[in-house]
Amino acid sequence: MLVPQMMQGMLRPEAAAAGGAPAAADVDPVVRLKQLKELLDVGALTQEEYEAKKAEWLKRL
């Protein structure tokens, strides 16, 4: 399933880069925000984690 890979890339961009996934800086912030929402919806992130990461990515817009 992609959820662990998505989480790794969003929560720790340096780990994603080492794992062969695109670095966080290479991904469109809007795409990241959609992925974060998906993670929240499936219960992979808490509301607090979601809000913190969302704020971080919104700064990049």
Image (cartoon, rainbow, N blue to C red):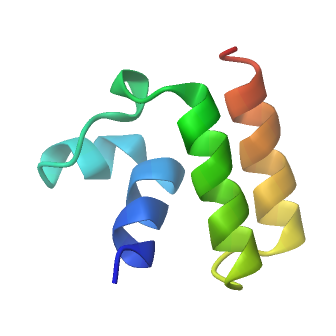
| Left or right: where 9 falls relative to 21 | right
| Left or right: where 5 falls relative to 53 | left
Residue 26, how many percent across, how many down? 34, 24
| Image point (86%, 52%), residue name | 51
Residue 28, how many percent across, how many down? 49, 26
In which quadrant is the N terminus drawn?
bottom left
Quick check: 60 above or below 52? above
| Left or right: where 48 falls relative to 6 | right
Nearer-the-camera pick, 6 or 53? 6
Residue 49, how many percent across, how many down? 77, 62
| Left or right: where 9 falls relative to 56 | left
Quick check: 26 above or below 10? above
**Residue furthest top as drawn:** 61
| Image point (65%, 49%), residue name | 34
Name the quadrant containing residue 3: bottom left
In which quadrant is the C terminus drawn?
top right
Nearer-the-camera pick, 36 or 9? 36
